[in-house]
Amino acid sequence: MNGAESLVRSLSTGGVEVCFANPGTSEMQFVDALDRTRLMRCVLGLFEGVVSGAADGYARMAGKPAMTLLHLAPGLANAGANLHNAKKARSPMLNIVGNHALRHLRYDAPLTADVPATAAVFSDWVRTAQAADSIARDAIEGLAVATSHPGRIATLIAPADIGWDEGGVIARPIPPHGPRPLDPQVIRHAVAALGSGALILCGGTVLEDPASTRLLAGIAKRTGAQLMAPGSNRRIERGAGRAVIPRVPYPIDMAIERLAPFRRAILIEAQPPVAFFAYPERPSLLLPEACEVIQLAEFDQDGRAAVRALADAVGARPARMTDAPRPEKPQAGPLEDLALSAAIASALPEGAIIIDESLTSANEMERLSSGAPPHSWLSITGGAIGIGPPLSTGAAVACPDRPVVVLQADGSAMYTIQALWTQARESLNVTTIVFANKSYDLLKQELFKVGANPGPDALNMLDLRRPELDFVALARGMGVPGQRVDCAAELHRVLSAAIHEPGPFVIEAIL
Amino acid sequence: MNGAESLVRSLSTGGVEVCFANPGTSEMQFVDALDRTRLMRCVLGLFEGVVSGAADGYARMAGKPAMTLLHLAPGLANAGANLHNAKKARSPMLNIVGNHALRHLRYDAPLTADVPATAAVFSDWVRTAQAADSIARDAIEGLAVATSHPGRIATLIAPADIGWDEGGVIARPIPPHGPRPLDPQVIRHAVAALGSGALILCGGTVLEDPASTRLLAGIAKRTGAQLMAPGSNRRIERGAGRAVIPRVPYPIDMAIERLAPFRRAILIEAQPPVAFFAYPERPSLLLPEACEVIQLAEFDQDGRAAVRALADAVGARPARMTDAPRPEKPQAGPLEDLALSAAIASALPEGAIIIDESLTSANEMERLSSGAPPHSWLSITGGAIGIGPPLSTGAAVACPDRPVVVLQADGSAMYTIQALWTQARESLNVTTIVFANKSYDLLKQELFKVGANPGPDALNMLDLRRPELDFVALARGMGVPGQRVDCAAELHRVLSAAIHEPGPFVIEAIL
C-alpha cells in the first residue's frame, strides 16, 4: 500500500466521505488511490475556488469536513479566497495539497513555489508529510484539528513521492477536542450584566441550534436584554417556530446607531463588532466606547452551554415564538427590493438552504423570510466575494434532499461561476438567482464613503454594463438551464418550479 | 494631494500607462485618484487572475510594467497563479494591493488576513506603505525593482488610510538596474566548450531579439554546437527570416533522449533543464550526468551581450536563414493534430501574437509555423494553467495593431474564462481557439506515468464531458461572438476572418 492509499483509507475510516478536487500531476497518486479504494465521493471543480467554497458549504451543512485535493502553490492560491471565508466561518476542512517530490524541489522546476507559506495564510494548521509510513498519521492529526470545536482549516502538504512510495500505514482516528470549558466567574459576571441596556451578541454554533436561540429569546424576555447576531455567520437555523435574531447591519453608520443604546455586551462565540472596513472619521469598533464587553464564550468555547448557564441563572425557559406572517407572493411588477424579496421568500419550502451573497440586493429578504418555513441561512463570512456558487454546490452535496436557493450578486458570481458546471455534473438541486444590477453596486456606495466625487473613469471601473453579462448563456455553456425574468410574479413562478425540479437552474433577475 | 494621487502621478511620470484592476473598498481612493488624474488607461477584470495574467501579457509585449490594483489577501491570492507565471517569466510587474487602514488591522475584521505573507510567495519585492508622504516613493522604488533586468514582480501593500491621507509627495523616477556584467573568465570557458557535442541553451531576453538568435545560428553553424531553448519562454520572436530554435520537449523521456548527446551545455539566461514534475525512477535533471554545465549568463545578466561575446570569439556572423516553407492551408477534414496546426499556421499574418496554452493539442503548430510571417510566441511559463485568456488580453492592450491568436486548452480556459469579458469591453482583437478535447488530457497522460492503472473514478475526475462545456455560449455570455468548428478548412476560414475583424472572437475547435 502506498502513502496515498494509506491516507485515503485512514481518512475514510475517520469519517471523511467526500473529496472536492481539482488535481494536477503531483496529485495523480491520490486520484489513483481514490479510484482504487472507491471510499469517497469525488467531486470535480473546474477551478480551485470552487473546490474550497464547496468544501466549506459541505462542512457547514454536514457538520464535518470534506477533503480537498489541490495542486501546488498556484492551485492553493486559487483556493485561497474561499479558504479565507471558510477560516472566518470556522468551518472544518482538511486540504491535501500536492507538492513536488522532496528531491525535486531544489531544482526550481516551473511550478516550484512556497507551498507551506501559501498554506499558512489561509490555514489554522499546516504540515508537510515526510514519509509514506507517516502521511496517514499526519492526515488524521489534521482531521482532528479540523474537527475540534468549532472547526478549523487544516492543510497537509503531500510531496508526490510520499504519495507513491510504498510503506503506507493506516492511522486510527483521533478524537477531536471538544469546546474549552467556560469560566464560572465570567458566567456570574455575565448574569449580573443582564437586564435593560444589555446586548447578547451570539454567533457561531449557537445560531445553528434552534433550541439555543429559543432559549436566548426566553432570556431576553425575562431580563430585558436584547439579542443580536454578527453580520455574517456560518449558518443560522431560522424561519417559522424559531427565534428571530437581528444581525448587526453592514453599513457602518447604521451599525453604530443600532448599537448605540447598549451599556453592556455579552459575547457568545462572537467578537466585539467591528466595521467591515475602516473609513475616514469613523471608529473601527462599533459598540459605544463606554459599553462594557463581557466575553462569555470565545469561539473555541461552548456557546450553547453558555446560553444554558445564563438561562439557568435567571430561570428562563425557551420562548414560545410568535411567528412573523408567512410571506405572501407578489403581484406582477418590476423587481424592486420589496417585490423581489417577497417573490423569493414566498417560494421557500421547508428545509430550504439559503446561500446569501446578495450584497446590495434583496434587502427585505431577511425580514420577509422570518415567517417562512424553517430553513438554513449561510452567509459569506470573510468578505471574499465569489462564494455563492461554490458554497451552494457543497451544501447540496451534503444535503441532497434539501433545495438550495442562492441569492447571488452578479459581480460576485463571476469569480467562481465555474461552479455551475459541477452543479450540472452532480445533478444538484441548486437554484441560483443572479441579481443583475450590472455593477459593483456595493463599491459605488463605498466610493462615496471615502469622500470621493466619482467621475466617469471611476464609475466605469465599477460598471458591468459594457458588455452586458448574460447569465443564462453562461449557465447554458456549463450545462445548466436558465431563464431571464424581470417581473416579481414571474420570478416567484420560475423559482418555485426550479426548486421542485431536480438539478440546477439559473434565474437572471433583471433589477 | 492625498497619498493615492501622489502614487498615481508618480508612477505615470515613471512611465506606467495602464492599470489592470479588480478593486474593492480598500482601494476606492486609488480608483478615485485614477479617475481624477486620468493619467492611466484603466482596464477592469472580473477576477483577479485576469488582472495579473493581463499585466503579464502587457509586460511581455510592451517591455514595461503595468500597474495592477488588487483587493486585500483574498484578491491577491486570486491573482496568485498568474503572478506565479509572471514571476517565472521574469515579467516586470508592479502590484498595488490594498489593505485595511493600519489602525483597523488589529480588530480582525472579516477581510483581515496576512497580506504581506501572501504577497511574499508570488513577489520578488514586497513593501507595506507607512505614510502618505512616502507611498509614492515606495511605489517608485518598486517600479525600479520591477523594471531592473530582466524584470521582477514588485508588490506594494497600500493601507487604505495611507491612500486617503493628505500629504502625498510626488516621487521622481529611479533608473532601474541594467544587467549584471558577464564574467570574462566564464566567457573564455564557454568559448572553449563550443564545438560538436556542445549545446547552447538560450532563453530570456535573447529569444526576444531576432538579431541575437540569428547570431546564435551563425555560432552554431561555425562551431557545430547545437541550439535549444527552454520548454517555456516569456516571448520568442520567430517565423520567416528568424532562426529556428527547438525547445526542450515537455514529456520527460523525450527530453532526456533529446539531451542525451550533449557533453557540454552553455546556458544563457537559462537554468539547467529540469523535469516539469518528478516521476518515479526518472531523474529531476534532464542533461546527462556527465555533461559539463557552463552558466554563461544568469537571468539577471546580459544574454545578448553573451551571444555577441561568443560570436566575436569564434568570428561568427548572423546566419542567413533558409526559411521553412510557408504553411499551406489544409483540405476539409477532421481536426487532427496536423490539419489543426496547418489551419492555424497558414492563417497567421505578419505581426501575429501567439499565446500558447495548447498543452496536448496542436503539437505540429510550432513546426508548421516556423515559415509563417514573423510573429511573437508567448508561453505559459510557470505551469499554472489558466493563463491564455488573460495573457492575450494584456498583449492586445499593449499592441492594439497586432492580432492575437490564442491556442487554448479547454480545461485550462475555464480557470480564467472571465477574461473574455474584458476583451469585449476593450474591443481587443483576440481570437481564442479552444481545443475542445473535453478532458484534462495532460493529466490522463500523467496518471500513467506515476504507474497508475486508472479505473472509472480516476478517469471521471479528468473528464470534462459530463456535461459538455459550450464555449460559444460562454463567450456569448460575456459579449464575445463565437463559432464551433469541426473541419480544418473551416477553421482556417473562420480564423482568418476573425483575425482580420476587430474585436474578440472564440472558435471552439471540436477535436
Image (cartoon, coloured by chain):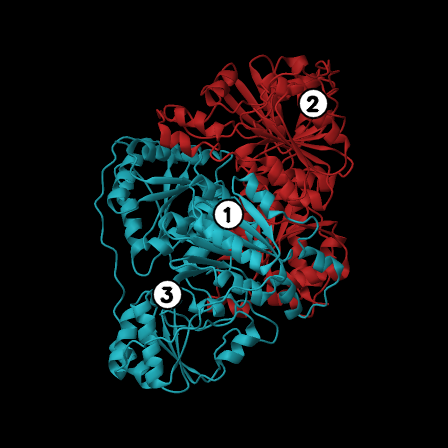
Chain colours: A red, B cyan
Picture coordinates of residue B431, whole percent (x, y): 48, 51
Give above or below for A476 relative to B322.
above
Q: Give the residue displayed 27% in from the left and 71% down from the top.
A: B305
Q: How many marks?
A: 3
Is residue A221 visible to the viewer in this orientation of the structure?
yes
Q: Which residue is mark 3?
A: B204
User: Which part of the image, by quadrant, shows the N terminus of chain B?
Assistant: top left
Q: Quadrant of residue A388?
A: top right
Amino acid residing under circle 2: His
For this orientation, the residue located farthest to the bottom is: B196
Report the chain holding disc 3: B
First reached walking from the N terminus: tag 1 or tag 3: 3
User: Which part of the image, by quadrant, shows the C terminus of chain B?
Assistant: bottom right
Q: Nearer the viewer, residue B28 or A278?
A: B28
Does mark 3 fall on the same chain as mark 1?
Answer: yes
Report the chain holding disc 1: B
Picture coordinates of residue B383, whole percent (x, y): 51, 60
Report the chain holding disc 2: A
Amino acid residing under circle 1: Phe
Q: Do callouts 1 and 3 mark residues in contact (Cβ within 8 Å)? A: no
Is residue A314 visible to the viewer in this orientation of the structure?
no
Q: Which mark is residue B505?
A: 1
Q: Which residue is mark 2?
A: A492
Q: Which mark is residue A135?
A: none
Q: Residues within 10 Å of mark 3 (few under 14, many from 20)?
A: many
- Tell whether B206 sits left or right of B379: left
- Tell whether B431 sits left or right of A43: left
Secondary structure type for disc 1 = strand
Q: Residues within 10 Å of mark 2 (few under 14, many from 20)?
A: many
Circle 1 or circle 2, nearest the eye:
1
